[in-house]
Image (cartoon, grey):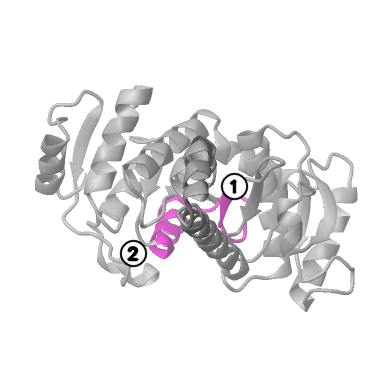
Amino acid sequence: MGSDSAPRPEVAGAVAAVREAQLEIILVGDRARLEAELKRVGARAERGVTIEHAAELVTMDDHPGEVFRKKRQSSLRVATELVKAGRAHALVSAGNSGAVLSHGLFVLGRTAGVERPAIATSFPTPHGPFTVCDVGANVDVKPSMLAQFALLGAAYDRVVHARPRPRVGLLSNGGEPGKGTELTRAAHALLEAAAARPGASFHYIGYVEGSDLWRGTVDVVATDGFTGNVVLKVCEGVADALFGLVRTELRETPRAKVGGLLAAPALRSLKKRIDFAETGGALLAGVDGVVIIAHGRSDTTAIKNAVKLADRFARAELPARMRDAIAAPAAPAAPA
């Protein structure tokens, strides 16, 4: 019940995932509305789809902490409790990301040793994808948290992109050691020490700048949630703007129009590669369960891919891998 157009894309996307990947889905929300949507997509008695009624819903205006205490029958609360009870293996929500974080924290609990969960996601480049952690969960962080985001991102990268020892960088305003803030300099020291210990499962390359992200020099970028979310939104905006400019140029002259027709297949393929709907969602890393946060503007394709991503992470036992990464001898220790 969380997206901007809920529950239409959630229901259609879930049904599409069931039909493509033979998954079992529990739709959580207002039963009457969900049944109406299932009927609309021709899946009223779809095998593998069940409904769990929830009388309340979380809005984008709800405060994350207050909604956890006051809306105990919300679709988000009921869905998270299903995961906690073992009746579901993963949670997918396109709703209030702050509320998803609070429910993940208070219902599922933090992974042992994790100070604050973070949101991890991937970006495509000509040289292969890279992972950013955090992209929105934590605005104000401590050095130890920032260093842990690097470890959580590295664990995510090992599972998603199969890189056994990813190259980790710390986002800053320059590559020189003296750059950054007190926060980044302190986190930099922690990561240097962690990477130098025997058994480190990542290679720390130091500071990286925004322009470095697209050059193939880094696999995982650690940053605070404020900066990471700005990076995420700027990338979405630049991609939309560039395609808008290309479309405009290809309509300017008859020759450009002919060229546009010839280039159309390649442009469609490129648009698909950078479309957030193809990724589906981002992982809430550092909680004891698989939680996928999808974009509020998610359509059917985005929800379908978010559900399939959740299934993949559940099968890979990603929370356990995160736990092992934080517990490793080379991991930066959280303060007592």
Task: Choose between 74 and 240: the one closer to the eye.
Answer: 240
Using the rendered view, name the quadrant where residue 301 is placed.
top left
Residues shaded magenta: 97-122
**Residue to which mark 1 is pinned:** 122
State the separation of the CA atoms marked 2 and 1. Answer: 29 Å
- The amino acid beneath tag 1 is Ser
**Place of residue 325 in the rendered image (x, y in percent of width and height, measured from the top left):** 69, 43
Q: Is residue 108 magenta?
A: yes
Give the residue at x 77% y 55%.
169
Give the residue at x 25% y 55%.
5
Task: Choose between 245 and 328: the one closer to the eye.
Answer: 245
**Place of residue 198 in the rendered image (x, y in percent of width and height, measured from the top left):** 89, 41
Q: SS class of the residue under badge 2?
A: helix
Q: Residues within 10 Å of mark 1 (few under 14, many from 20)?
A: many
Q: Is residue 159 above or below residue 96?
A: above
Q: Can the viewer see residue 17 in this picture?
A: yes
**Place of residue 150 in the rendered image (x, y in percent of width and height, measured from the top left):** 71, 54
**Place of residue 333 in the rendered image (x, y in percent of width and height, measured from the top left):** 75, 57
Which quadrant is home to the C terminus?
Answer: bottom right
